[in-house]
Amino acid sequence: MILEDKINQSETRIFKAVFPNTTNHYDTLFGGKAMQWMDEVAFITATRFSRQHMVTISSDKIDFTKPIPAGTIIELCGRVVRVGNTSLKVSVEIFIEQMYEVGREKAISGTFTFVAIDKDKKPVKIIV
């Protein structure tokens, strides 16, 4: 299989509604909750790409460019952007959609690095 095909097939999109139990005192999504969801989407993307045991080893700069208000829909999009010997990077973006309006805008973006591991939790080669 061609690498680009494998990347396209592993792209992951998850939608969530932003409810009050996930927001702060400003009625916007907690940054920590956004990062948790981003790591989850990145993990699913990395696992779908490699079909191996993957662990997060780092997150790069995460840009919070727009607050995400309660009562909106968000889409988290994960895509593999680099494949190394034992690690890979996944870019995750979060888009905001108003529930009763057309259109969306990017609110958050970041990159997560994963390593493939064996049963002894030692790094192993990513099978491409």
Image: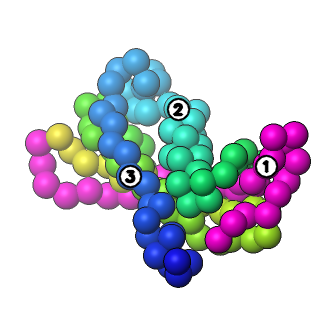
Q: Residue at x 37, y 27 (%)?
A: 27
Disc 2, SS: helix
Q: Please say whether residue 36 is visible from this viewpoint.
A: yes
Amino acid bearing label 1: Ile
Pinpoint residue 6: horizontal percent, then vertical percent.
51, 70
Q: Residue at x 27, y 38 (%)?
A: 72
Q: CA distance from mark 1 to mark 2?
A: 26 Å
N-terminal of the two: label 1 or label 3?
3
User: For residue 121: magenta?
Assistant: yes
Q: Is residue 89 above or below residue 3?
A: above
Residue under pointer 1: 117
Pinpoint residue 45: horizontal percent, then vertical percent.
53, 54
Instruction: Please report contact status of discs 3 and 2: CB closer than 8 Å, yes or no.
Output: no
Residue under pointer 3: 13
Amino acid bearing label 2: Lys
Residue under pointer 2: 33
Q: Residue at x 62, y 59 (%)?
A: 50
Q: Which residues are magenta?
A: 100-128
Q: Residue furthest top?
A: 21
Left or right placement of residue 14 versus residue 98 in this view = right
Q: Residue at x 65, y 71 (%)?
A: 128
Q: CA distance from mark 1 to mark 3?
A: 25 Å
Left or right placement of residue 121 versus residue 91 in this view = right
Q: CA distance from mark 3 to mark 2?
A: 17 Å
Count of numbered circles on the image: 3
How crowded pointer 1 is (Cα within 10 Å; few <14, some 14-19, many 20+) is rated as some
How crowded pointer 2 is (Cα within 10 Å; few <14, some 14-19, many 20+) is rated as few
Pinpoint residue 5: horizontal percent, then vertical percent.
46, 76
